[in-house]
Image (tube, rainbow, N blue to C red):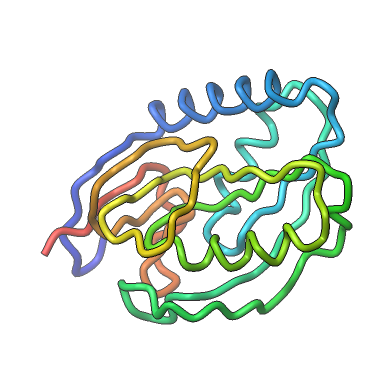
Amino acid sequence: MEQVKTRMLFDENSIAARVQELGKQISVDHPEGNLLLIGILKGSFVFMADLARSLSLPCQIDFARISSYGTGTVSAGQLKVVMDVGISVKDRHVILVDDIVDSGLTLSEYRKRLESASPKSLKIAAMIDKTARREKFVHVDYYGFRIEDGFLVGYGLDWDEKYRNLGGIYIIEP
């Protein structure tokens, strides 16, 4: 990696194994199907693809593009919906898929937006549940890994649109 010091937190094999576990659990929790995965772009795309393939039941997939970071490493705290879902969530089992839950501001606000459309159920799946800077409570129903703090890149996570393509998850060190 160029000009930043990083340390690997989770390698490709441990990520793959954890995603398979999450897929099995989601499949068990939703035996009746009618499942809609909504990925938060751009960060969720890698996790979402792996998670969808790990399910043992059919599902539909849609995306929303929401921003709260801009170019910094700390959430700006303002929700901006750039692109909303196109598939109705009404009476559906919805799983909102994100790369990371940090402050909770983005998912908390977007969750309210989806709840107003009357899904049958609404759960959250995130690759990373980061707890130290949580400002809004967000229950993460399915998470890959929980960490306290740190700025992460790789496996869809970015820093100013860079490093999403890394197979592992790395922490940027000061």
**Number of numbered markers:** 0
- State the quadrant of the C terminus: bottom left
26 on left or right of 174: right
94 on left or right of 88: left
- State the quadrant of the N terminus: bottom left
Q: What residue appears at the point 25 percent right and 55 percent down from the top-left corner?
A: 132
Q: Is residue 56 above or below residue 149?
A: above
Nearest the viewer among 108 and 17 is 108
Residue 170 point in image, percent of width and height = 28, 49
40 on left or right of 1: right
Residue at far left of view: 174
Q: What residue appears at the point 65 percent right and 54 percent down from the top-left corner?
A: 39
Residue 137 point in image, percent of width and height = 44, 55
Nearest the viewer among 44 and 29 is 29
Nearest the viewer among 129 and 39 is 129
Residue 14 point in image, percent of width and height = 38, 27
Q: What residue appears at the point 40 percent right and 68 percent down from the top-left corner?
A: 162
Which of the 4 image quadrants contains residue 30? top right
Residue 21 point in image, percent of width and height = 53, 22
